[in-house]
Each structure stands twice: as structure tokens, then as C-alpha cells.
Amino acid sequence: TAEPVDPVRVLTNRSSGKQGFAIAAALANLGAEVTLVAGPVAEPTPPGVRRVDVETAREMLAACEAALPADVAVCVAAVADWRPAEVAAGKTKKTQGAPPPEIRLVENPDILATLSRAAARPRLVVGFAAETETVEDHARAKLARKGCDWIVANDVSRPGVMGGSDNTVSIVTRDGVERWEEAPKAEVARRLAARIATTLGGETQ
Ligand code: CTP
């Protein structure tokens, strides 16, 4: 997501959206009816997918809630954890001799945790964890904290993951951990979509 500071500035992150778009494409390929709620990224819309574009975390939450009921929610967006407490109405100007402005942040809603506790909770709620150390321990803690069913953990300390085309992930569930080999994001997406279909009792062919 991108969180406005003033009409010309935003706080955002380096996520490309590639993994999320690949998952939407893979699920649509298996015949799922997919709503892709996307932050401001440069990826093309996969065929057969309904895309809803948003900017901020709060808009993303509203769009996700509007997409319920659903059999599965896959929360792969890099949602900004915080947003500026105030958004300046006009562009903040640099004034000679004045100190730089201070930006006070407030916490954004947690979309994954909110969907996990929703009255219309999807049967399967999948979150992602971008970690740089003790990846699986953090993922297990996140699973419990957020109330989701799976965490797809990826080690973003590996060179080229953020914005790159390959990913090395572990699937952490209440029953244990599956480590998958490094693969292109499209292949990770196909395997994840197949696992989702199997779990929901659908056909994967
Ligand atoms: N997420 C979300 N809403 C937020 C922040 C994160 O839905 N406001 C989701 C992400 O889409 C992802 C998962 O939560 O599926 C993990 O996000 P992460 O930022 O790693 O979680 P945090 O709780 O912020 O943990 P940490 O600070 O340890 O990174």
C-alpha cells in the first residue's frame, strides 16, 4: 500500500506485487472466481481476474471485506504497518532555516487478522511473512497472533527476493512446516494454488 503524507508524497515499500498477481493468476487458472485487491503496483491484470485497485491499507481492508464471502483469502500484500497520523491538505513546503517536518505515525488495521476473525471468515485464510531472521519461528508466532490457517514464510534477506522473480518459501501450518525449494514466483503460485484447491476439496486438473 501507499500511505499519503501530503498530496504529492507517500510512504510505501519495495514490494512489486509479483507474487500476489501470480497467485491470483494460478487460482483463476484452476477455475476459481478471483477478486484481486491490488495496491499501486505495475503488474498487468491476469486474465479472468476481477481487479480492485486501492492505495491505502484502510481502502484495502474495505475492498477485502466487500469481496466476502469467499472460500479462501490469500493476504500477500505488503501492507504499510503505519500511516501518517495527519495528511497535509497542501504540499508541505521547504522553508529556509525551518527544521524538517516530523511525521507522526499511527498503526494501520491488520487486514489478515481482521479477515481471520470476520463473521464471514473464509474457510482458509493464508498470510505471508517476509522475514529476515529465524523465519519459521516468527512465522509460527504470526500464525497464532493473526489467527490465520497458513503462513507462507519467505526469507527476504536472500538477495533478489524483493522485486525479483524467484522465491524460497516455507508453508507453516498448525501441523508443521513444509520447506519448498527456490522456484520462480509463478511456480510457487501454482503449487500454492494446487495446495489450496486440495485443501478445499476441489479439483486441481
Ligand atoms: N498484513 C495485513 N495488514 C497489515 C499488515 C500486514 O494484512 N496491516 C498481512 C500481510 O499481507 C501478510 C502478513 O500480514 O500476510 C504478515 O505481514 P507482516 O508485516 O510481516 O506482519 P507484522 O505483524 O507486521 O509482523 P512483523 O512486524 O514481525 O513484520
Image: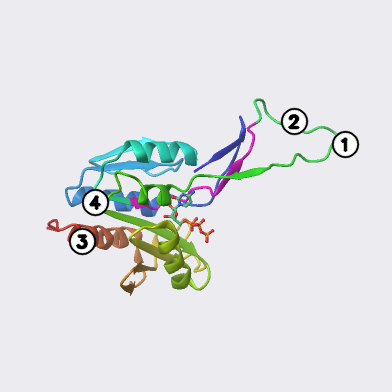
- Estimate the x, y position of residue 74 in percent, counting from the top left: 33, 52
- Estimate the x, y position of residue 170 in percent, counting from the top left: 37, 69
Decide which of tag 4 and tag 1 comes sooner along the chain: 4
**Mark 1 → mark 3, Cα distance in angstroms:** 61 Å
Label 3 environment density (alpha carbons within 10 Å; few <14, some 14–19, many ≥20): few
Q: Is residue 8 magenta?
A: no
Q: Residue shown at 37%/47% (left/top)?
A: 115
Residue assigned mark 1: 97
| Residues marked 4 and 2 touching at CB (< 8 Å) | no
Q: Which amino acid does label 1 sit on?
A: Gly
Q: Which residue lies furthest to the front in this view?
A: 119
Please tell me whether residue 197 is drawn above or below residue 33 in the rendered image.
below
Decide which of tag 3 and tag 2 comes sooner along the chain: 2
Please tell me whether residue 108 is drawn above or below residue 194 in the rendered image.
above
Q: What residue type is labelled 4?
A: Leu
Report helix, strand or loop for mark 2. loop
Decide which of tag 1 and tag 3 comes sooner along the chain: 1
Please tell me whether residue 26 is drawn above or below residue 68 in the rendered image.
below
